[in-house]
Image (cartoon, coloured by chain):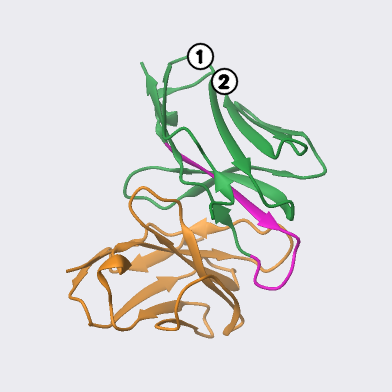
C-alpha cells in the first residue's frame, strides 16, 4: 500500500507567476483535500475533491483551483502568485464517508519572492 | 476567527512523566475531534480521535478527553517518550455534510527531555 506522495518538495517562484503542485493519493482512497500551512499556523482547508468534482471549498480566492483525475491523483494550481502564498501545501487523501481520517503527504514548500 | 485554539505554543516534559496538551473550540457544530502529530519535513499523521457522544477515548499511551460544556479537549500522553517530541495539532469537524473539512489549531510543540 503506497502512501500519499507530493511533488515537488520545494519550489521557488516570483510574484505574479503560476504554479502547479501534484499529489498522488493513497491506494484505494477516492477523496483528496488540499491544505495551506503558513509558518506558525495550523493547516487551513483550501478545497476537497471527490470523484473528480469539487466537494467543498475554504476561504481561498478563485486563483486557487484544483483537479482530480480518474486515478484519484490531484493538482493544485495557483495563479498570480502573491508573497503571502508562501507556505507549506499539504495534500491529504481519504475515503468519502463519516469521520474519515485524512492521510497527509509530506507537503510542498512554496516560496514566493 | 480562530475556531480551534491551542493556547500553548510549546511544552517541555521529562521522559516518563505525563504530557497534557490542551485545545479549546468555539463552534458548537463541531462533533468530531482529532489529534495529529507532525515531525519536521513530514506531513501530519493521525493519532487519536473522539466523537462528541463520548468524553474519553484511549489508545495505548494516548488518551483524549472531551468536555463539551466547556468546549475543551485534552490529549494525555503517559508515559512520555523522547520519540513523542513533535508538533501536535488539534482538529475538529462539524456534522457530516458534503465537503466537510477539518479545522486545525495552531499546534503545540512538545519536547520530551531524556
**Quarter occupied by residue B65:** top right
Q: State the separation of the CA atoms marked 2 and 1.
A: 6 Å
Disc ID at residue B17: 1
Disc 2 + disc 1, Cβ < 8 Å:
yes
Disc ID at residue A57: none
Q: Which residue is mark 2?
A: B78
The N terminus of chain B, quarter of image: bottom right
**Quarter occupied by residue A81:** bottom left
Residue A82 x/y as whole percent: 27, 74
Label 2 residue SS: loop
Tell me the subunit letter for badge 2: B
Question: Are discs 2 and 1 located on one and the same chain?
Answer: yes
Q: Is residue A21 left or right of residue B56?
A: left
Tell me the subunit letter for badge 1: B
Residue A24 x/y as whole percent: 44, 71
Question: Does residue A20 belong to the magenta stretch?
Answer: no
For image coordinates 32% across by 83% down, the residue present is A79
Residue B22 x/y as whole percent: 57, 32
In the image, the chain rendered in orange is A
Question: Does residue B88 belong to the magenta stretch?
Answer: yes
Magenta residues span: B87-100
Query: Which tint was used for chain B?
Result: green
Q: Residues within 10 Å of mark 1 (few under 14, many from 20)?
A: some
**Quarter occupied by residue B97:** bottom right
For image coordinates 36% across by 16% down, the residue present is B114
Q: Earlier in the sequence, mark 2 or mark 1?
A: 1
Q: Residues within 10 Å of mark 2 (few under 14, many from 20)?
A: some
Amino acid at each position: 500500500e503506497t502512501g500519499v506522495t507530493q511533488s515537488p518538495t520545494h519550489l521557488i517562484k516570483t510574484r505574479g507567476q503560476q504554479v502547479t503542485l501534484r499529489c498522488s493519493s493513497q491506494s484505494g482512497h477516492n477523496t483528496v483535500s488540499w491544505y495551506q500551512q503558513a509558518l506558525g499556523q495550523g493547516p487551513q482547508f483550501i478545497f476537497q475533491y471527490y470523484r473528480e468534482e469539487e466537494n467543498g471549498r475554504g476561504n481561498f480566492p478563485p486563483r486557487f483551483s484544483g483537479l482530480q483525475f480518474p486515478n484519484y491523483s490531484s493538482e493544485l494550481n495557483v495563479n498570480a502568485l502573491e508573497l503571502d502564498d508562501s507556505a507549506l501545501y499539504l495534500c491529504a487523501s481519504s475515503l468519502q464517508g463519516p469521520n474519515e481520517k485524512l492521510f497527509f503527504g509530506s507537503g510542498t514548500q512554496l516560496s514566493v519572492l | 476567527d480562530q475556531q480551534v485554539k491551542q493556547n500553548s505554543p510549546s511544552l517541555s516534559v521529562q521522559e516518563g512523566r505525563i504530557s497534557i496538551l490542551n485545545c479549546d473550540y468555539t463552534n458548537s457544530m463541531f462533533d468530531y475531534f482529532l489529534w495529529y502529530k507532525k515531525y519536521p519535513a513530514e506531513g501530519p499523521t493521525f493519532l487519536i480521535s473522539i466523537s462528541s457522544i463520548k468524553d474519553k477515548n484511549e489508545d495505548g499511551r494516548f488518551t483524549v478527553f472531551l468536555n463539551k460544556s466547556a468546549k475543551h479537549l485534552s490529549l494525555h500522553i503517559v508515559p512520555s517518550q523522547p520519540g513523542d517530541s513533535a508538533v501536535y495539532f488539534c482538529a475538529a469537524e462539524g456534522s457530516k455534510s458534503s465537503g466537510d473539512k477539518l479545522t486545525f489549531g495552531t499546534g503545540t510543540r512538545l519536547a520530551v527531555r531524556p
